[in-house]
Image (cartoon, rainbow, N blue to C red):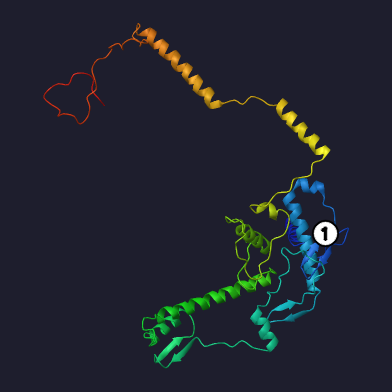
């Protein structure tokens, strides 16, 4: 009988260890096999959650995963390299994106032209044979520049200008090509970002507009000694117009503002309020200096009382409290054998 009990207990333990694949729930969970997602709408048991939270969450997760695996086993399968895989259907639940959809990179001006004309990009070889140097040189890069410099080690100078620097002109042309390519690249970036740019140069936020430049030109022209009377005009020069332009120009008469009864009354009230509410200004520096002077006078009076009247008197001579004078530096030699009289200078 003991053996039978042991076998039954062992079987019961095995049944508890390996749970069945069938799961019963009050409300059927929503299963999205395409995303391998399970949404369980059932309420959780609050008592079991408080009793043993870890075990309850583990059992709940196991049941939901079992439902997902059961749905996957119902899908059609195929063999791929000695492995059986299931074909997942398209997902049902729309998931939100963390970022916006990627925007295709806008085409440059050259790419648009090439697409319109049917020009295809050709792959260039990394190295080409140079018959002058009799060796293979790179097609582009700094090694290409070194090869060009090695090939053009001497340049012909024109006969009419023997002091002309041909190496400098060649270097300037190369720098000009680099700057031109950089300007074209910046224009492509500005056009892709839909930033309005002029035909030449770039306009930033701190650059003045055309109207402001015309106004400044007219003001400068009228700032001469003759107030612009004898200043010559440029061809196709425009005159600045707008509010406040004549007031900015020197020599122009400013128009008197039209006064109204309400405005006059408001200004008079402001003047009266300013006069009535006027408070005396406090000169902090002067107050501090007066306070210092009073403290100094009190301190001198106290010192004079302690010394027994050895203070200065008006119209009298100075009392000789200490008759010795300080030695002046640099006048006479010092006798080290003679002992100095008086206090030691530090």
Viewer-nearest residue: 222 or 124: 222
Q: Is residue 296 left or right of residue 32?
A: left
Q: Residue furthest right?
A: 26
**Could you tell me if residue 20 is visible in this image?**
no
- What is the x, y in percent for residue 71? 81, 70
The quarter of the picture where residue 198 lies is bottom right
Q: Residue at x 72, y 25 (%)?
A: 276
Q: Residue at x 12, y 22 (%)?
A: 338
Q: Residue at x 68, y 85 (%)?
A: 115
Q: Residue at x 70, y 49 (%)?
A: 254
- What is the x, y in percent for residue 135? 40, 90
Q: Residue furthest left?
A: 337
> How many numbered circles are shown?
1
Viewer-nearest residue: 231 or 68: 231
* Mark 1 crowdedness (10 Å alpha carbons): few <14, some 14-19, many ≥20: some
Q: Is residue 181 left or right of residue 6?
A: left
Above or below, 302 against 255 in this view is above
Instruction: Residue under label 1, please give it.
Output: 40
The quarter of the picture where residue 67 lies is bottom right
Above or below, 12 against 290 in this view is below
Above or below, 73 against 132 in this view is above
Q: Is residue 283 left or right of residue 264?
A: left
- What is the x, y in percent for residue 127? 47, 87
Q: Residue furthest top?
A: 308
Q: Secondary structure at mark 1?
A: loop
The quarter of the picture where the C terminus appears is top left
């Amino acid at each position: 009988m003991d053996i039978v009990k042991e076998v039954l207990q062992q079987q019961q333990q095995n049944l508890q260890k390996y749970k069945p694949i069938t799961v019963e729930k009050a409300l059927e969970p929503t299963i999205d096999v395409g995303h391998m997602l399970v949404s369980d709408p059932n309420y959780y048991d609050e008592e079991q959650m408080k009793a043993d939270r870890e075990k309850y969450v583990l059992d709940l997760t196991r049941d939901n995963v079992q439902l997902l695996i059961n749905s996957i086993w119902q899908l059609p399968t195929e063999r791929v390299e000695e492995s059986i895989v299931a074909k997942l259907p398209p997902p049902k639940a729309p998931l939100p994106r963390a970022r916006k959809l990627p925007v295709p990179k806008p085409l440059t001006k050259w790419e648009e032209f090439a697409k319109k004309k049917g020009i295809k990009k050709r792959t260039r070889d990394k190295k080409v044979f140079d018959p002058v140097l009799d060796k293979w040189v790179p097609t582009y890069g700094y090694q290409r520049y070194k090869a060009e410099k090695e090939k053009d080690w001497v340049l012909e100078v024109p006969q009419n200008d023997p002091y002309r620097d041909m190496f400098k002109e060649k270097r300037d042309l190369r720098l000009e090509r680099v700057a031109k390519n950089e300007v074209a690249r910046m224009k492509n970036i500005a056009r892709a970002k839909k930033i309005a740019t002029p035909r030449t140069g770039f306009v930033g936020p701190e650059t003045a507009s055309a109207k402001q430049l015309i106004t400044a030109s007219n003001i400068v022209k009228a700032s001469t000694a003759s107030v612009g009377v004898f200043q010559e005009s440029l061809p196709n020069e425009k005159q600045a117009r707008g509010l406040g332009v004549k007031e900015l120009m020197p020599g122009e008469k400013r128009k008197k503002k039209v006064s109204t009864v309400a405005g006059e009354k408001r200004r008079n009230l402001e003047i009266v309020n300013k006069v009535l509410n006027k408070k005396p200004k406090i000169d902090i520096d002067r107050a501090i200096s007066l306070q210092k002077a009073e403290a100094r006078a009190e301190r001198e009076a106290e010192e004079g009382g302690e010394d027994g009247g050895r203070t200065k008197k008006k119209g009298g001579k100075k009392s000789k409290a200490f008759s010795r004078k300080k030695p002046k530096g640099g006048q006479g030699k010092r006798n080290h054998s003679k002992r100095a009289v008086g206090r030691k200078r530090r």
